[in-house]
Image: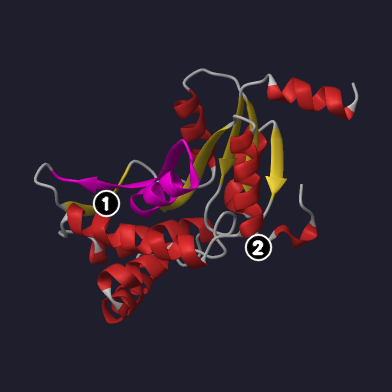
Amino acid sequence: MGDGDAVLAMAAMDVVAAFDFDGTLSTRDNFVPFLLRFAGKAPTAQAFARSGLDIVKGGRAGWQMANVRDDVKVSLLRQLVGGREAADLDDSARVFASDVLARHLRREAVERADWHRAQGHRLVIVSASLATYLRPIADELGFDAVLATELEVTDDGRLTGAIDGQNVRGREKARLLDVWLDGATPFVFAYGDSSGDKELWARADRAVRLGRRAHRGTE
């Protein structure tokens, strides 16, 4: 089959392009910058200090870095988000999203997403970042869905500070993608930049390394 035939065959297929966000679609990590905007510099710094002490006291200093990172994330959210109004967080998230769209997107990744959309492919963000600010970004970029870290909200609209479900990294990325596909079997492109995307790459039909850590090869 020649290149032209391959393009025509792909055009007739159901195709999904799954993009990691931090470091792939965006040029940076966005979780801490968002907390700084929402909670302020001093409270965020204090929360980091307490999180580190809690991990050491809990005997977790020797854990793998991924586990420590997850523990710190949970601790920061509990301290900085717990008890706040979900509506206030969403308001901050929309402002934050506008700044990311204006200043912190990777042009090459956005161009890839634009190409997929032009071919009629479905687009999904799969990220450990918070869904509250990824949703307005996804809407602006023309993505079909966001599979990202959700926060638990009480019946009266307050945040508990807990993650609703799991932190969306590693195996959870691949699992949520399969849940979203709901039994469908499209050809899946997966774009990512780090070890947190390995399981998503393994799940994909075509894995693409793209972003800040892609200097050792693009695919």
The residue sitting at 28% across, 62% down in the picture is 92
Q: Where is residue 191 in the image (x, y as percent from the top left)?
A: 63, 45
Q: Of all residues shown, which one is farthest toward the bottom?
A: 42
From the viewer's perspective, tell me whether residue 142 is left or right of residue 19.
Answer: left
From the viewer's perspective, tell me whether residue 32 is left or right of residue 10.
Answer: left
Q: In which quarter of the image is residue 189?
A: top right
Q: Is mark 1 on a helix, strand or loop?
A: strand
Q: Badge 2: few (under 14), some or many (20 or more) residues near its Cα, within 10 Å?
A: some
The residue sitting at 50% across, 25% down in the picture is 181
Q: Which mark is residue 212?
A: 2
Residue type at the position of mark 2: Arg
From the viewer's perspective, tell me whether residue 7 is left or right of residue 185.
Answer: right
Q: Of all residues shown, which one is farthest toward the right?
A: 2
The residue sitting at 31% across, 74% down in the picture is 44
Q: In which quarter of the image is the N terminus?
A: top right
Question: Start and end of the magenta stretch?
Answer: 131-154
Q: Distance between the residues labelled 2 and 1?
A: 30 Å
Residue type at the position of mark 1: Ala
Residue at mark 1: 162
